[in-house]
Structures are given as C-alpha cells and as structure tokens.
Image (cartoon, grey):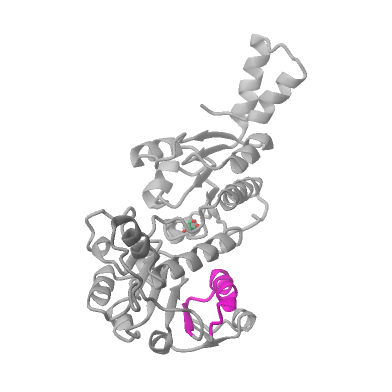
C-alpha cells in the first residue's frame, strides 16, 4: 500500500474527522506525490525519514529477504525513485520496466557493482550510495576477521569445545602476529585508511599499498608506501583487499597474486567476492602457498555450504557482515533515504555517485 505517514498523522493530530469527501481529496493529493519503491525492509531511521518527509508516497517489500525479480519488475513500474540494497540488480531490464518517470536510484550500500552505471547514465538517472557512514564498522570487522584468521580463533574454539584441548603444547595452534609485520592494502580508500589506523597500535612495521593510481593524500595519513601490484604481493605479511569491484578489479586476486605471496601470509577480503578467483584461492590455501584467508564476501552469496573453501581450516568465512552494526545500518538507511529525497527534489544528494 502506498503511504505518506506524516500527512496522515497531521490529519489525525488536529483531530479532523476525515469525511468521505476529505478522504478522497487526501487520496488525490497523495497520489500526486512522487512514487518510490523500497526493495527491502530497511532499518527504522531511513523509513522514518521517508514517512516524515511528506514528500513521497512509497511502497516497500516488507520482508528481510530479497524481493523476487518478477515482483520487483512489476512494482518498479511508473516509479519516480527506487531505494534498493545490494542484492537487487538495477540493470537495463529493470530500468525499462520502471519506465521514463524514474529519476533516482538510491542504494543502501557503498558498493555499486549491482548497478548498471552506463544504463543509469544514459537515462540521466541520479544515483545515491552510502560511503563514509560504514567506514568504522567495516574497518572494525576487517581487523576482527584478520585476527581471527591469523590467530586461528575458530579452530581454537572448536578444539576447546570438542575435546581437542589436551595438555599445553609448545607449537599447537600457533599463528602469525601483527607486531613487526608488513600490511599491504589492495585499493587504498577511506576503508583502507581506517583499517590501517586501527592496525597501527598492534606495532605494524610498515604499510604498503597498491592502486590504479597513487593516493598521496590518503597514504600520508597512514605513512603508507606506494608499491607495484607484484611488490604488494611479495612483501605483505597481511594483505587486505579494499578495492571496489569493477571490470578492472574482477578476479585480480588470482594465481598470479597468490603465487607471489609469502607462505606465512594472510589474505583478507571485505570488499567484494568478485575480486577473487576462488579456485585459485582454494589452491593457494590447500597447498600451503599462503597461510590463511579471511573472507567476508564470496561468489556467490550465500556461498553454498558444500563449497570446497568451507572444508579448509585455514579459511574463515563470514556472511557479508562488515557493516552490520545497528548504528551503521541505521545510518546507511538514513543516508539512502536522504539521498533519495534530495534527488527527487532535483537537489544535489548528500552522497551522489558521479556517473
Ligand atoms: C556495502 O555497503 O557495499 C557493503 O558491502 C555492505 O554493507
């Protein structure tokens, strides 16, 4: 059902007895508002912003599971705006189904590999996304995943629970420490900087990074040295992947990278599964080419439970939870809502993706 909560509440507050005739007028006024489809139950802050704006009528897929594609194609028809999450492909088919009214797509994510940017640009549709507000949460989770992987915490709790904990042993469950290590960052952006800032107090010796271009303004913040792709692979004791998934980064973490990495190195990916060739990663982990991997993202998602990577003790897999704190998810939904409303007013969005 289409609703604009504030308009309704205003009427209720002033105690108006909505006569059949006034109700009809109200419905008419409502139907003049821009129509928005929200593709998922989003956290409350974003919904409140939409409701209280009185600026849009919106319909929401009222579930925590993704909207079926057919339903999405149907519901998008005639909409002025779409607020989506990263599981919805916003491609030519969807944009055709939505039709010419569509002015704004606002995604509740920093990643935008689910959006066909060329199609959006061609149709002059503005795109909002949610950088910055999730940087702390993602950096925090990346550090947690890195330590969990390098200090073998999952194996350790499993042993403790299942009777593997015998006597104290000198080399049992030994892992790798951050002190005096070299940390490499593949794709230095806000999140990479935030990860390095958090790792620094662990006495990391050196930060290095590689990217399509050097980022001196960011590198200075963490005293990171720019090196080539090969050197980041060769020198890193810990390699954190922070780059966006683009045609250029698709599958760049492959045999070529893993074979150059040190045998005691730990590979961490909290960006997108698509940057990794998972067969090559499996090979590298199972043959001892690298020591361990922590993945918050995979291809596909969810990763089937019978996937070979799940059989490896030295691979820790999380279900894409890097930004999953209540504060951050609320902030993401609020920013997505504000982006959407600004775009529909024809104003610059708080965080607009430059197409
Ligand atoms: C994003 O926003 O793109 C993350 O992957 C999910 O929080």
Note whether residue 355 is visible: no
Does 75 sit left or right of 134 as displayed?
A: left
Residue drawn at x 53%, y 87% as measured from the top left: 206
Q: Tell whether position 182 is magenta.
A: yes
88 or 156, which is in the foreground? 156
x and y percentages locating residue 347 in the rendered image: 68, 52
- Residue 172, by quadrant, is bottom left
Task: Reply yes or no: does residue 338 show up in magenta.
Answer: no
Magenta segment range? 181-204
Instruction: Please give left or right for residue 193 compared with residue 299 in the image.
Output: right
Q: Residue at x 50, y 59 (%)?
A: 121
Residue 87, how many percent across, how many down? 40, 50
Pick the front one: 95 or 68: 68
- Height in image: 262 above or below 201? below
User: Residue drawn at (51%, 53%), measured in percent from left and top?
Assistant: 324
Residue 309 lies, in percent from the top left, at 26, 64
Left or right: 230 in relation to 218? left
- Measured as percent of width and height from the top left, residue 256 is found at 29, 83
Question: Relative to residue 14, is residue 238 drawn left or right?
Answer: left
């Amino acid at each position: 059902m289409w609703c604009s909560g504030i308009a309704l509440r205003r009427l209720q507050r002033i105690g108006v007895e909505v006569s059949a005739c006034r109700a009809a007028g109200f419905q008419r006024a409502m139907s003049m508002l821009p129509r928005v489809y929200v593709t998922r139950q989003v956290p409350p802050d974003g919904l409140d912003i939409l409701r209280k704006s009185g600026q849009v009528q919106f319909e929401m897929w009222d579930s925590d599971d993704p909207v079926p594609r057919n339903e999405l194609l149907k519901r998008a028809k005639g909409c002025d705006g779409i607020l989506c999450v990263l599981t919805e492909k916003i491609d030519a088919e969807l944009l055709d189904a939505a039709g010419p009214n569509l002015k704004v797509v606002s995604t509740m994510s920093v990643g935008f590999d689910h959006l066909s940017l060329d199609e959006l640009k061609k149709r002059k549709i503005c795109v909002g996304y949610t950088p910055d507000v999730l940087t702390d949460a993602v950096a925090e989770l990346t550090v947690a995943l890195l330590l969990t992987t390098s200090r073998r915490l999952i194996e350790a709790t499993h042993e403790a629970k299942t009777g593997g904990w015998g006597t104290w042993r000198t080399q049992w469950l030994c892992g790798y420490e951050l002190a005096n290590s070299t940390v490499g960052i593949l794709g230095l952006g806000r999140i990479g900087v935030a990860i390095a800032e958090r790792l620094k107090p662990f006495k990391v010796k050196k930060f290095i990074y590689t990217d399509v271009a050097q980022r001196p303004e960011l590198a200075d913040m963490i005293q990171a040295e720019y090196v080539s792709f090969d050197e980041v692979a060769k020198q890193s004791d810990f390699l954190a992947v922070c780059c966006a998934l683009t045609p250029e980064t698709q599958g760049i973490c492959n045999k070529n990278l893993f074979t150059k990495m040190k045998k005691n190195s730990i590979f961490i990916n909290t960006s997108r599964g698509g940057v990794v060739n998972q067969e090559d990663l499996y090979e590298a982990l199972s043959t001892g080419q690298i020591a361990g991997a922590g993945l918050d993202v995979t291809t596909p998602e969810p990763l089937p439970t019978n996937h070979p990577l799940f059989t490896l003790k030295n691979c820790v897999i999380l279900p894409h939870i890097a930004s999953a704190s209540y504060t951050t998810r609320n902030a993401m939904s609020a920013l997505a809502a504000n982006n959407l409303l600004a775009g529909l007013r024809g104003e610059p969005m708080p965080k607009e993706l430059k197409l």
